[in-house]
Image (cartoon, rainbow, N blue to C red):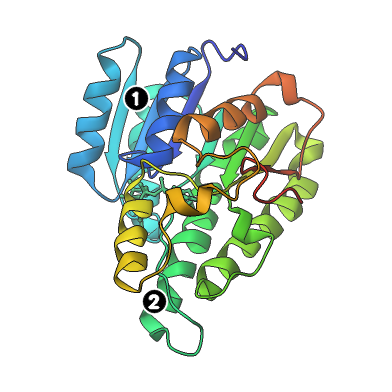
Amino acid sequence: MYGLEGRRAIVTGAAYGIGKGIAARLLAEGCEVGILDLDGEAAEKTAAGLRESGGKVVAAAGNVSSRSDVEAAVAKLTAALGPIDILVNNAGVLKVGKLLEASEADWRSHFAVNVDGLFYMTRAVAPQMVERRKGAIVNIASWMGKSGVAAYSAYCASKFAIIGITQSLATEVGEHGVRVNAVGPGLIVDTKMRDESEIKRKAEGLPSAFDRARDIPLRRPGFPEDIAKAVAFLASDEASYITGETISVTGGLWND
Ligand SMILES: NC(=O)c1ccc[n+]([C@@H]2O[C@H](COP(=O)([O-])OP(=O)(O)OC[C@H]3O[C@@H](n4cnc5c(N)ncnc54)[C@H](O)[C@@H]3O)[C@@H](O)[C@H]2O)c1
């Protein structure tokens, strides 16, 4: 455990998958947690499930790629929790497709959610962190934000952008006591995104996540809890001299 008792956190895209795992870990660490998701019904259901193990969890519906949605959801969560100490920008989309074949809509959706979403969330939450001289932001990038991969051009471009924003913002807010880091997950199963991408890969005759995991040095795919541990560390005072960093959590699939 990383000593996060009493901190207030917002996790985006926490109705399912990695975000849900992060919300559960922060709750177990003693945080009060706000979850923000496009799927408001699923977010409420996830919040209710997490509350069963004790602690405060509040849900808000909203599309991170809409500035007005973000402002309304952050206002709701801040009113319920108080000033936010930890922001985890996790919401993201992935559409498999080669650059020369992808639709313009698919291309744009990666940037609308993965990049604009992070921009709006950060602009809505970080100013109060700067004002209070206290805060940690953790962005969920990907190993595909460090390496280009065939059929994932738009996704990779959006994740490279997240690592660029992480490094830049860290240099802007460091003097105000706010740290900004990222986690780059590898092949993570038990998520909605992975399930959907596996269906598409199977239809195209491509190997499954578990087949591909045989080539990962640690010989298994990752789980949301693997990412959640790294997020809890980066959000905590144990990481008080780390900023602008992107930690790969890939079982050795990618180490840069
Ligand atoms: N699963 C993997 O292998 C993997 C690997 C590397 C990085 N990631 C990253 O981890 C993050 C979480 O992915 P996941 O695998 O848990 O996927 P997921 O589909 O299970 O979860 C994504 C969540 O984001 C929400 N969401 C999507 N669009 C949104 C929007 N516009 N506004 C608000 N919420 C929105 C979804 O409703 C969902 O709850 C993403 O940023 C993804 O790119 C995943």
Which of the 4 quarters of the picture holds residue 147? bottom right
The crowd level at tag 2 (other Cα within 10 Å; few <14, some 14-19, many 20+) is some
Three-letter code, disc 2: Asp
Q: Name the residue located 50 percent from the left edge and 63 percent from the top edge.
A: 116
Res 184 visible = yes
| Image position, residue 71 (x, y; %) | 39, 48
Is 52 positioned to the left or the right of 227 in the image? left
| Image position, residue 175 (x, y; %) | 82, 38
| Image position, residue 182 (x, y; %) | 64, 44
Q: Name the residue located 36 percent from the left edge and 40 percent from the top edge.
A: 190
Res 78 visible = no
- Looking at the rendered structure, the secondary structure element under dot 1 is helix
Instruction: Look at the numbered discs 2 and 1 and tell me whether their residues touch, using CB distance below 8 Å.
Output: no
| Image position, residue 73 (x, y; %) | 34, 43
User: Which is nearer the eye, 204 or 137?
Assistant: 204
Q: What residue is shown with label 1?
A: 80
Q: What residue is shown with label 2?
A: 106
Is 22 positioned to the left or the right of 156 in the image? left
Three-letter code, disc 1: Ala
Disc number at residue 212? none
The crowd level at tag 1 (other Cα within 10 Å; few <14, some 14-19, many 20+) is some
User: Which is nearer the eye, 255 or 232?
Assistant: 255
**Quarter of the image with the N terminus in it:** top right
User: Which is nearer the eye, 243 or 202?
Assistant: 202
Q: CA distance from mark 2 to mark 1?
A: 35 Å
Which of the 4 quarters of the picture holds residue 128? top right
